Structures are given as structure tokens and as C-alpha cells.
Image (spheres, rainbow, N blue to C red):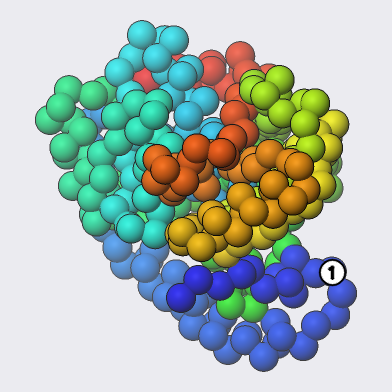
Amino acid sequence: MKIYKPRFWDSKKFSVWPYVFFPFSVIVNLINLIKFNYSKREKFNIPIILVGNIYLGGTGKTPLCIEIFQILKSLKLNPAFVKKHHGKYADETKLLENIGKVFSNKQRSEAVKSLISSNFKVAIFDDGFQDPSVKSDISIICFNEKQWIGNGYVIPSGPLREKLNALKRCNYVFINGNQNLEFEKIINKFNPEIKVFYTQYKLTNIDDIINRKVLAFAGIGSPENFFDLLKNNNIEIIETLKFPDHYNFKKIDITNLNKKAKELDACLVTTGKDYFRLNNEDKKNIKYLKFELLIDKKEEFIDELKKII
């Protein structure tokens, strides 16, 4: 069943719901504790770069994976992506397949073995920080400045997949947004060795929509970030529509979207992930936002990559 992210997850106001669900969060914490204390990690003879998150959804993992892929290619290396096979996340896999080879398996360790046998030299994991089966050489956690850690609770009381002490297993934190020293203090409290980098999105196909009215829709973890990106680039948004994360659009949804866009004299614009969930027929009147990820202090990060490669 597709559900929307609960509002109380990101609310700074008092809510009784985190306390109602807290016993279940305790169980999640216990499962995480057992999983990471008693699981054996498999080590491979190629560099493995893991890009994950603690906050559930909308942190920019996939764009960072793509940027790291481009960096490694510029260094004359032969990287490929690893994505756990899960029908729900087929949109992310399709997005990555437009960039490079993706190895997908229900077990990430098996995907890595296939990657190695195909003569690829670096594995980039899109997600997997909560998977203890494979030992990574670099672990990166992504946050978005706007949502940060939400209400600070672990699911289902809040949006965190595990407690922040998980940062002890992390080498780098990437925050999409502006520099925030308060966030850095919290991060370094759990792991003073972590290096923090910041990223911004730069639209690359803005000319397609800059002088048009836009009906924007999205079925991602934090659709507000997508809508804000449009607004911050002076796109005239007539209306926004939210769908559940990883939503599989039905024919009636596309029909209704096209009808509403026609009534508003607007063009339909969505995210890359949403676009790649559509069939070719449904894509006809829909544009998707293309962007590149700009890393602040990029050369410093490249130097960090070179250390393990």
C-alpha cells in the first residue's frame, strides 16, 4: 500500500503520535542493534563507495551517486552501480541505467560479484547503509538541509531509519543546501572524524520551461524540495500535486493531469524518478527536471576518493 509521509515526522510542534508509535521504534532500534553487532560483512578486492541515508527519503542519494560516477570516469576508472533488487525502487534503477551499468540483486554481495566478473573496477552503492552484509571502503550519508532529521525519532515515530549514533559508521556527510554549523556540531558530536560537504542543484534544461506556466507533480520522499527548486529558479508554478513516494501512476492519473494542465494552460513538469516510472505513451506531454549536482570543495572530495582508489 502506498502511503504519504506523515506530517508529524517533520513537525517541530508537539504531537502525541511519536509517543504513540515509540514502542515500535524501540523494536526497530533493537533490530538495528542486533543486525550490526552480529552480522558478518563480506570484504571485496575492489573499492566500494556506499551512498546512503538515515533520514528516510529525499536526501539526494541518487544524484550524488551519479556525480561520483562521473568523477570516477574522469579519473579513467571503470565504475558501475549496485542497487538492491526491489520492484518499488525500479524508478531509481532506470535513472541510474541512463548513466551507467547497474547490477541489481536481492543480495548486494551477489550484485558485487557480478560487477567484478564483468571487469568493473569500482562499485557505487545507491543505498545500503543499513545493510551489514558488505564492507564498504567509503560510507557517505546524505541529508537535506530543509528536512535535516525531522522530529529526530526513528520510524515509525519519526523519519529516521536508525539513531544518529549510526554516524559512527560513516566517513562523510553530504548536506544538500546551505552551510549549517549547528548541523555540523551535531554530526561531529557522534563522529568527530566525519568530513562534511555541501551540494546544490543546478538546472540544466531550464530553457524548456522558463517562460511557461507549470503544473508540477511529484511522487518522491520530499516533493516540497522539488517544488522549491522550481520556485527558486523563477519558474511560474500554477499548481503543485503530491503523490506517495515511488507512486506508480495509473492511466487515469495521467489523463487527469493532462486535463488539468490544459485547463490551466500549463505544461506538466515532474522529477526524473517520476518520469522514468511512466510508459512511453504517458511521457508524451510531460517534461522532467534535469540538473547537475554541484559539490562545494569538489577537488577536496576528489582527493578523498583518490585515497582509496
Which residue is painted at 61% across and 69% down in the image?
A: 4
Which residue is painted at 18% across and 30% down in the image?
A: 116
From where the camera sits, is residue 128 visible? no
The answer to which quarter of the image holds residue 205 is top right
- Please state the horizontal and vertical placement of residue 140, each as a whole percent of the image: 52, 40
- Please state the horizontal and vertical placement of residue 262, each as a whole percent of the image: 69, 47
> What residue is disc 1 on?
12
Residue toward you, 186 or 18: 18
Asked if residue 265 lies left or right of residue 142, the reply is: right
**Among all residues in the image, which is located at the extreme left?**
117
Local SS, label 1: loop
From where the camera sits, is residue 35 visible? yes
Which residue is painted at 71% across and 20% down in the image?
A: 207
Which residue is painted at 56% across and 45% down in the image?
A: 141
Amino acid bearing label 1: Lys
Asked if residue 73 lies left or right of residue 45, the reply is: right
Q: How many tags in the picture?
A: 1
